[in-house]
Image: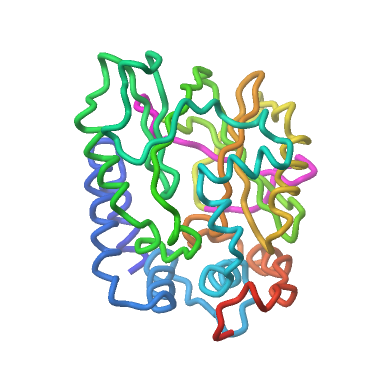
Amino acid sequence: MKNFKIIIRNIFLRERTKTLYRKLSKLKSIMMLPLNDEQFTKINIRMNSGIKLELKKPERFIDKINWLKLNYRNPLQTEYTDKYLMRNHLINHGYNHLLPPLIGVFESFDDIDFNQMPEKVFLKTNHTSGVNQLVEKGKTDLHKVKSRFNRALKDNYYKYSREWNYKNIHPKILVEEYLSDDKLVDYKFFVFGGKVEFFGVIKNIIDKEGRASLNSQINLYEKTLKKSDIDINRTGFDDSDFELSQYVTEMIEVAETLASPFPFCRVDFLVGQNKLYFGEMTFHPNGGQLVLNPIDNEIKYGQKIDLTRIPRNHLKPDN
């Protein structure tokens, strides 16, 4: 099944057929709706990675991430996942300088008056993953954008990923200033028990429409800034002439502060030549499907997630 999934992904996940691929992925999730969260998660991980989850006595990274996904219920997770409410948390921590400039927040696409907007704006939803769009006056097909965002506003991302933190977010559309720096790089910090252990650097992150690019490239680095030996089955880039951002130390400090209430969290930033922006926080990378190859890394980083320190009131009642 895993090999079949890889074949399908390689055939369809390309620019011309990416929409079809995403529709097929959503259809698969809809067909699995009758399954409870644990059944869904076990089958989904097996289909996509070939791994059989061990949830009763989790030891590997992927086991513990999915145990958290199914059992951890810290109310802050919902607020930190909500891209709109998270802005308040950043302000309260004194990080308002990291926020992308916000033009407006809307509950309906029809409420947005693009005539009153700048020439270029960036739209994204607060309650889901991957629904964002560059809108440029006179060039962007607003009918297509409206259709896409209206579908997203009616949807609940929880049913496709079974990530509890998405379940109770009230959907909104955020309109932000367009970040004109075409050299933006995505930095993703993996924080275990409030401490960054490693981070990813992703280049070529968006396409010409402002959506996630299929041609992105990622390298992983240790907190010491040395190249990591972790393999996540993604294409890397030649970093012989690449310099890590001048903001790395600041990003580590911010990531550790924001992630300190949680046993594990990933904190993302967008970095330009002379500017740093907060991106988002993720509790289950790739919906819980991320595998840290080789297996030694799965054990090593699994040991850094301490499930025994989670307060009882942050667990599902039946745990």
Look at 32% across and 61% down and name the residue there: 5
- Snapshot colouring: rainbow
Q: Which residues are magenta?
A: 207-232
Q: Quadrant of residue 238?
A: top right
Quarter of the picture containing the C terminus is bottom right
Q: How many marks?
A: 0
Look at 63% across and 66% down and name the residue there: 298
Depth order, front residue of 293/37: 37
**Residue 224, magenta (yes or no):** yes
Q: Position of residue 26 (x, y in %)?
A: 28, 57
Depth order, front residue of 117/1: 117
Q: Position of residue 308 (x, y in %)?
A: 73, 77
Look at 51% across and 42% down and name the residue there: 84
Look at 60% across and 71% down and name the residue there: 64
Q: Quadrant of residue 252?
A: top right
Q: Position of residue 158 (x, y in %)?
A: 40, 61
The answer to whether any part of residue 219 appears in the image is: no
The answer to whether any part of residue 307 appears in the image is: yes
